[in-house]
């Protein structure tokens, strides 16, 4: 029996939830954007010092004058939403039941700097493939929780909310919803939380699918000797990330509270901090659209969760790179451009039965290539239904 059953709460009520942001909060956001104090910028440095000034000004201007939060609020409210208390923490989640009676339950987990809004374009095709040109036999009941500390799951109120604790909470959530057998999928942090869920609840997790998965070398030189040219390039990319692009992780894993003062008080600070990664993983060519970036950023701003979302890095840092047991749950992996997923490293940790590589999309696959991600999820889970 999974250790998730040890999660106990006196309050196990599942409460309907609806997003209703006060207009005063949106007016305050626009006022703050209008009063931005812009920094200077060195000439000709491009992205090498961070998000360029002209890129951020363009996004900020669109955010203040054109972006329609109410439209995206309505889109999110089109999906049934709920909150419940698990292990003392408020957990917000979307729960969309398929019209197909034999649908497989599937829990989707987002990453940073994302949110459940990442899944706006995949929920329909996953839950109702018949209405989206697909096979109704591929249908899922979708559960998409906000990670504790993110969005409407609100700030965490205690230490210790690391990947394993979140995974235990997810197992408890699926138990409360009455799902005895289900699949798990995730990218970014979701590609760490979902595998942990499979490890602690293998009796109920029928299959695991991840994208943007990352496993590091074990330290054994023999492990890297037979890597393909593509895999070697990905390994070199890991090295470049560590030396050139890991500053955000170093800050969030050591001083998330200090960072929070800047981001909670400045929407431009929040925009820059999140856009760094939406744009960087999109190779600075707009692979993640403006509205998608701004919907996620606005969620962080309106819920005041920049600091609490960053705390996951500090909680998780203690286990980064640790050796994990081999998961026996059947696993599918989708690799998109820019991902540093290396199969021999992944096979140390997972029983991989499905592997796909794509030449379109990127780290935020649900936003950048929702059709490809949806298709791969369907293909993988056909073998374990």
Image: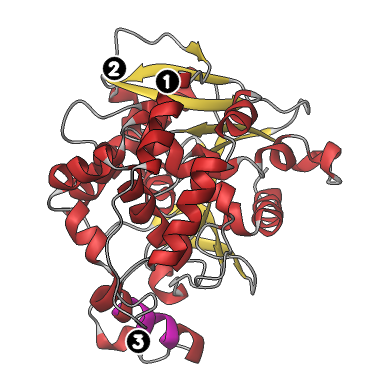
> 330 or 356, which lies in front?
356
The spot of residue 303 in percent (x, y) is 36, 29
Q: Report crowding for label 3: few under 14, some 14 to 19, many 20 or more residues within 10 A (C-alpha).
A: some
Specify which label sits upstream in the sequence, 1 or 2.
Answer: 2
Residue stretch in magenta: 232-239
**Quarter of the image that includes the C terminus:** top right
Q: Is mark 1 in CB contact (under 8 Å) with mark 2?
A: no
Disc 3 secondary structure class: helix
> What's the CA distance linking mark 1 and mark 2?
38 Å
Q: Which mark is residue 8?
A: 2
Q: Tell me the residue at 42%/67% (across/down).
A: 346
Residues 330 and 319: in front is: 319
**Nearer the observer, 132 or 209:** 132
Viewer-side label of 1, 2: 1
Q: Where is 13 relative to 354, above or below?
A: above
Q: Which mark is residue 24?
A: 1
Q: Is residue 236 magenta?
A: yes
Q: Is residue 232 left or right of residue 334?
A: left
**Lower sequence index among marks 2 and 3:** 2
> In this view of the protein, can residue 162 be seen by the observer?
no
Query: What percent of the width, then of the height, locates residue 135?
Result: 84, 44
Task: Residue at 56%, 48% (x, y): give it.
Answer: 292
Residue marked by disc 3: 224
Residue 190 in the magenta stretch? The answer is no
């Amino acid at each position: 029996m999974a250790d998730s059953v040890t999660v106990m709460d006196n309050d196990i009520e599942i409460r309907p939830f609806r997003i209703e942001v006060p207009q005063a909060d949106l007016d305050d956001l626009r006022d703050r954007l209008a009063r931005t104090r812009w920094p200077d910028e060195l000439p000709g440095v491009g992205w090498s010092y961070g998000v360029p000034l002209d890129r951020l000004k363009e996004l900020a201007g669109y955010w203040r004058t054109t972006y329609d939060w109410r439209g995206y609020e309505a889109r999110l409210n089109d999906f049934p939403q709920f909150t419940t208390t698990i292990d003392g923490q408020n957990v917000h989640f979307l729960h969309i039941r398929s019209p197909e009676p034999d649908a497989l339950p599937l829990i989707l987990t987002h990453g940073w700097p994302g949110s459940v809004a990442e899944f706006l374009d995949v929920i329909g095709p996953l839950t109702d493939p018949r209405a989206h040109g697909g096979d109704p036999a591929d249908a899922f009941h979708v559960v998409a929780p906000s990670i504790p500390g993110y969005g409407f799951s609100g700030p965490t109120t205690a230490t210790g909310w690391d990947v394993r604790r979140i995974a235990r909470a997810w197992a408890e959530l699926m138990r409360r919803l009455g799902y005895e057998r289900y699949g798990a999928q995730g990218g970014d942090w979701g590609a760490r939380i979902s595998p942990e869920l499979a490890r602690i609840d293998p009796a109920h997790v029928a299959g695991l699918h991840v994208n943007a998965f990352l496993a590091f070398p074990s330290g054994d030189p023999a492990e890297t000797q037979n890597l393909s040219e593509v895999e070697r390039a990905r390994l070199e990319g890991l090295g470049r990330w560590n030396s050139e692009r890991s500053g955000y992780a170093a800050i969030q894993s050591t001083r998330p509270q200090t960072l929070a003062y800047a981001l909670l008080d400045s929407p431009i600070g929040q925009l820059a901090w999140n856009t760094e990664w939406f744009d960087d993983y999109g190779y600075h060519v707009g692979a993640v659209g403006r509205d998608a970036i701004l919907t996620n950023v606005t969620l962080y701003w309106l819920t005041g969760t920049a600091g609490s979302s960053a705390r996951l890095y500090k909680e998780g840092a203690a286990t980064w790179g640790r050796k994990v047991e081999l998961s026996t749950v059947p696993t599918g992996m989708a690799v998109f451009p820019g991902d540093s997923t290396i199969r021999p490293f992944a096979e140390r940790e997972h029983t991989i039965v499905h592997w796909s590589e794509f030449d379109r999309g990127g780290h935020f696959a649900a936003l950048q290539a929702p059709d490809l991600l949806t298709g791969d999820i369907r293909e993988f889970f056909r073998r374990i239904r």
